[in-house]
Image: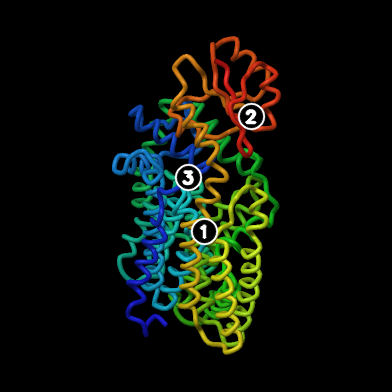
Amino acid sequence: MYHSRAYYLPALVVIILTLSFFRLGSFRLFDVDEAVFSEATKEMVQSGDWLTPTYNGVNRYDKPILFYWLMALSYKAFGVNEFGARFPSALAGCLLSIMLGLFMKKAGDSERALYASLTFVLSIYFVAYTHAAVTDMTLSLFISLSLFSFYHAVAGGQRRDLYLYGFYLFSALAFLTKGLIGIVFPFGIAMAYMLLTERLAGLKKVFSFGAAALFIAVAAPWYLAQYSVNGQEFIDQFFIKHHFRRYTGIISGHKGPVYFYIPALLIGLMPWIVFLPAGVISSIRAFRKHGPSADSGPVSARHSPELLALIWLGGIFIFFSLATTKLPNYILPAVPAASILIASGMSGLGRAGLRYTSGLISAVSLLLGVAFLIAPKYLAGLGIAGGWWTFVASGIMFCGALLNGYTAVRGRRLHEYGALLMLAFLLLVSLRLLPVANDYLQGTLYRFSIYAKENLGSDRDLVLYKVNKPSVVFYSDHRITPLDRIEQVREAMTARSGMLVITRQSEAGALQQEGLTLIEKDRDYALLERK
């Protein structure tokens, strides 16, 4: 496939750029994470304090500094808006998809290089997190680059020291992006890989005093400066609460079962995920043939990007599956590894396996086609107009069912046509599905925020009662007072002459009994005031 079509590479570049930036700033920020990162960076730019992020004027220790800096630079270039907030993630996704293909090509397989990049880009995970102003795509880029560098350092022939320095450098950037997992994942995966391929003797290849000095020079200054300014508060909040307690306890109600990431990967990497088992099996077989216990061939024969990807995917999957707090984005740093294994499965799958996987995709596509066809009936109950896009989505799924049904019968590889259908679906997601979901979830809050921006004076408070919606702070350009108890509302009414309150509809009645006037109810939210 790769060699017979000269236009595949430029077409891939166009697909990457299109899916990364298409309608990037066309819909509002989602609560909670997108909005809180965007507002914290907005406050950083306004205050000029580039050391300690704040949200609503309070120090925010959830994440390290690098992503805030990248977003702040983007704000400087594109303005404080949705495009500026999301640009770092889109750029990181572009770079990662390109580097993924280059890594696989350097490892010796052009066809798998194309498949790896294509399946990564043509996924719901890619479109969702290149269009999200959160750390995850940037973190995935740095972890991937660190592991690509590590692999070339231990399996490549030339410039091994340079690649080892790259391994430490990108790990340091990952550490500055999301904390300790920037160390745990790259070094844990690298050590496990060396133990499997070269046993204990191979561990020394992971470590370098010079590279460690580079890591410290890049990563340490911000942490030391932060501690010197904020002291034990920084340690307690950043390391204890947002690292250890987040892993062992439930933060912000984000609890999930141990199998949480199985459906997350199934949905996020559909339809390509069906090729993952074949890639995993192929990697295990190759390791058994060339691993240390085989005692056959040189040590270099034991190295393969698929084995690295298997350890990479398995390690991150197990780590987060055992954590108490779970979110779909946590597993994103493992998605490039899954794409490498999927590419291996697609490339090496026999005729019988191809028929089975194509039949499975055909059946799922058929079910999704029916689901989109009947979706308008159920969307209407939520106050959402189905419209033309549900029928287009249904048509794409039915075409996918026919294409893969044909492949299942004939046993022919038609991955390029499947890629075109997935591209059409993902463009539809960006064009219509994301804006529809955004309007449903954020539309009312945005209108209430603009009302607050236009009507609040300095003598009146903006109160969020029993809701945590940072988008209100971002769009209203006003500090908020978060309250959770009716007694706090009474105290606030006594202390200030007036207030504007955003809350859920279910809480509006209790607030009206306290003397607040209802301005508007819409969907799940209510806007009240006391003049």
Which quadrant would the N terminus be assigned to in this image? Answer: bottom left
Task: Identify which residue, 93 or 319, lies in the foreground.
Answer: 93
- Calculate the distance from the C-alpha at mark 1 to the C-alpha at mark 3: 19 Å
Q: Amino acid at mark 3?
A: Lys
The residue under the point 57% across, 62% down is: 390
Q: Residue 399 shows which numbered tag?
A: none
Q: Residue 125 shows which numbered tag?
A: 1
User: Foreground mark, 1 or 3?
Assistant: 1
Q: Position of residue 377 (x, y in %)?
A: 67, 57
Which quadrant would the C terminus be assigned to in this image? Answer: top right
Q: Quadrant of residue 493?
A: top right
Q: Position of residue 366 (x, y in %)?
A: 64, 73
Q: Is residue 293 visible?
A: no
- Calculate the distance from the C-alpha at mark 2 to the C-alpha at mark 1: 31 Å
User: Is residue 211 shown above or below 120?
Assistant: above
The residue under the point 52% across, 58% down is: 125
Task: Identify which residue, 94 or 210, lies in the foreground.
Answer: 94
Is mark 2 in CB contact (under 8 Å) with mark 1? Answer: no
Q: Residue 178 shows which numbered tag?
A: 3
User: Is residue 231 shown above or below 367?
Assistant: above
Q: What residue is pinned by disc 2?
A: 466
Q: Amino acid at mark 1?
A: Tyr
Tag 2 or tag 3, which sits nearer the N-term? 3
Q: Position of residue 479 (x, y in %)?
A: 47, 25
Task: Identify which residue, 71 or 288, lies in the foreground.
Answer: 71
* Left or right: residue 312 compared with residue 100: right
User: Foreground mark, 2 or 1?
Assistant: 2
